[in-house]
Image (cartoon, helix red, strand yellow):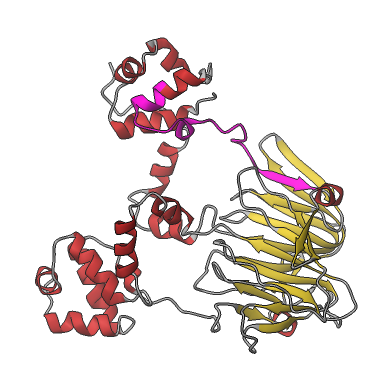
């Protein structure tokens, strides 16, 4: 098993064990552990890896090395996408074909779907999934979308393909929340496809943790979070953890109980924000968590953007034309943009704080990027796709259309909230990257 030296050093520091103590607990020679913390040797047989993990109260996977440490760009040709085709039989018919787009191993990847359910048939609903998504009609035909058992204007709607001007804006798009049942059928005789950009869910780690909670603890969590999560119930949870009542917390912050109650009722008022800020400072919590989200969804949780909406957002960005897909402030990490690339000159540099997924919808385009060994490039035609890592400078040139998607797989908005609180964030990141320094008590 390949051991990641940085994970090993981190856990030795976190557990407060010296190199000698860790080696002795694991039954390993001290020199072998030193080699694991260097570039000389990172391998152990399974029994040794298990012993090392047990010495640090870990699972072996928590020390496992990543052979793809220096990922910058992953790309996939149209032929490679076609090779990933898998037909889905549903409700007694050939319902979809699925295709996987480019992504690193172990990451959530977007998919393209051939919509095959005929227009005269009500498409059977799926069960939804944890990850939120942006869905875009790639055309050429229109698609019926379904989001509930009862058919209403909110649960049944046509996703239109662009049959008019600005063909690089390929179709309607919408944002879909977690566990929203959905399904699609053709809306006419023309074939149609969608791209479903299924993004990393920020609550996935919580769900993984909750899987190991006792039934009683999970039910207590549900009671604490029942209904819409608002300032009052969340504040009470924060105060209970600090063994405070609202009255005692107000006194510590130099507030009148009446002021705190008014702030809870109107957290976005000028007075409410000031009171909650003072309370958070006095008790040591982030008052921003108590501010309500700006919901932008309909009754089933989806947020829609029509072709005309996207047209109205069209703008020049460097050498590109850009137009926005559906987005929602309550899912701030989920982004989508139509990009029109034209001309053989160098495209404008794109450098984002989070990962990108790209899908070539039209034309032949070249993606260039600044790789660890110098400039690199790949040519991609229709149905080609690519993934770029955070802060990798890259650019497109050629003549065509590419769909640009983003998720919160570092840096997401939760990371930004944390970084705004971090003491000397640049120094912290410099120290933390590739850190194998002991915590200071090794001889």
In the image, farthest residue toward the front: 92
Residue 10 at x, y percent in the picture: 39, 33
Of residue 49 and residue 411, the one placed in the foreground of this image is 49
Q: Position of residue 110 (x, y in %)?
A: 69, 57
Relative to residue 322, is residue 421 drawn left or right?
A: left
- Residue at position x 83%, y 72% from top? 139
* Point 56% across, 55% down: residue: 353
Q: Is residue 301 magenta?
A: no
Q: Is residue 244 visible?
A: yes
Question: Where residue 9 appears, x then y in whole percent?
Answer: 40, 28
Q: Which residues are magenta?
A: 51-76
Picture quadrant where residue 18 is located? top left
Q: Residue at 71% x, 45% y: name it.
A: 74
Compared to residue 121, the image places residue 85 above or below, namely above
Quarter of the figure with the N terminus: top right
Q: Is residue 419 above or below residue 93?
A: above
| Residue placed most toward the observer, 245 or 397 | 245
Is residue 403 found left or right of 230 in the rendered image? right
Q: Quick one: 204 or 95, which is closer to the camera? A: 95
The single residue placed furthest to the bottom in the displayed view is 153
Q: Quadrant of the C terminus?
A: top left
Residue 347 in sight here: no
Where residue 23 appears, as percent x and y from the top left, is 35, 16
Is 141 in front, or is 278? 141
């Amino acid at each position: 098993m390949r051991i990641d030296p940085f994970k090993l050093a981190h856990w030795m520091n976190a557990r407060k064990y010296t190199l000698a103590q860790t080696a002795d607990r694991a039954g390993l020679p001290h020199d072998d552990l030193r080699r694991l913390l260097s570039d000389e040797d990172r391998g152990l047989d399974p029994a040794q890896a298990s012993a090392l993990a047990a010495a640090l109260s870990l699972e072996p996977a928590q020390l496992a090395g990543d052979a793809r440490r220096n990922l910058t760009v992953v790309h996939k040709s149209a032929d490679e996408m076609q090779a990933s085709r898998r037909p889905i039989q549903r409700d007694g018919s050939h319902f979809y074909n699925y295709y996987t787009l480019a992504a690193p191993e172990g990451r959530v990847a977007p998919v393209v779907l051939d919509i095959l359910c005929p227009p005269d048939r009500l498409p059977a609903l799926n069960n939804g999934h944890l990850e939120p998504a942006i869905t875009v009609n790639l055309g050429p035909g229109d698609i019926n979308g379904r989001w509930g058992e009862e058919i209403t204007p909110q649960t049944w709607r046509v996703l239109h393909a662009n049959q008019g001007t600005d063909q690089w804006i390929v179709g309607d798009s919408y944002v879909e929340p977690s566990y929203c049942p959905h399904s699609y059928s053709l809306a006419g005789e023309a074939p149609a496809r969608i791209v479903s950009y299924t993004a990393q869910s920020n609550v996935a780690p919580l769900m993984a943790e909750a899987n190991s909670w006792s039934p009683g603890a999970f039910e207590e969590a549900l009671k604490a979070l029942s209904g819409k999560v608002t300032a009052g119930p969340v504040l009470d949870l924060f105060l209970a953890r600090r063994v405070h009542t609202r009255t005692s917390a107000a006194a510590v912050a130099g507030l009148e109980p009446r002021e705190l109650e008014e702030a809870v009722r109107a957290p976005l008022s000028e007075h409410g924000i000031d009171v909650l800020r003072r309370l958070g400072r006095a008790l040591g919590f982030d008052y921003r968590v108590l501010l309500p989200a700006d919901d932008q969804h309909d009754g089933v949780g989806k947020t829609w953007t029509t072709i005309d909406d996207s047209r109205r957002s069209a703008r020049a960005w460097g050498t590109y034309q850009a137009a926005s897909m559906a987005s929602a402030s309550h899912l701030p990490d989920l982004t989508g943009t139509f990009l029109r690339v034209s001309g053989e000159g160098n495209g404008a540099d794109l450098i984002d704080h989070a990962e990108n997924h790209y899908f070539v919808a039209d034309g032949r385009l070249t993606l260039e990027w600044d790789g660890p060994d110098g400039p690199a490039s790949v040519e991609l035609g229709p149905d080609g796709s690519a993934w770029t890592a955070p802060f990798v400078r890259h650019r497109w040139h050629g003549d065509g259309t590419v769909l640009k998607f983003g998720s919160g797989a570092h840096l997401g908005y939760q990371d930004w909230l944390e970084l705004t609180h971090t003491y000397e964030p640049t120094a912290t990141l410099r120290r933390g990257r590739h850190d194998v320094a002991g915590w200071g008590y090794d001889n």
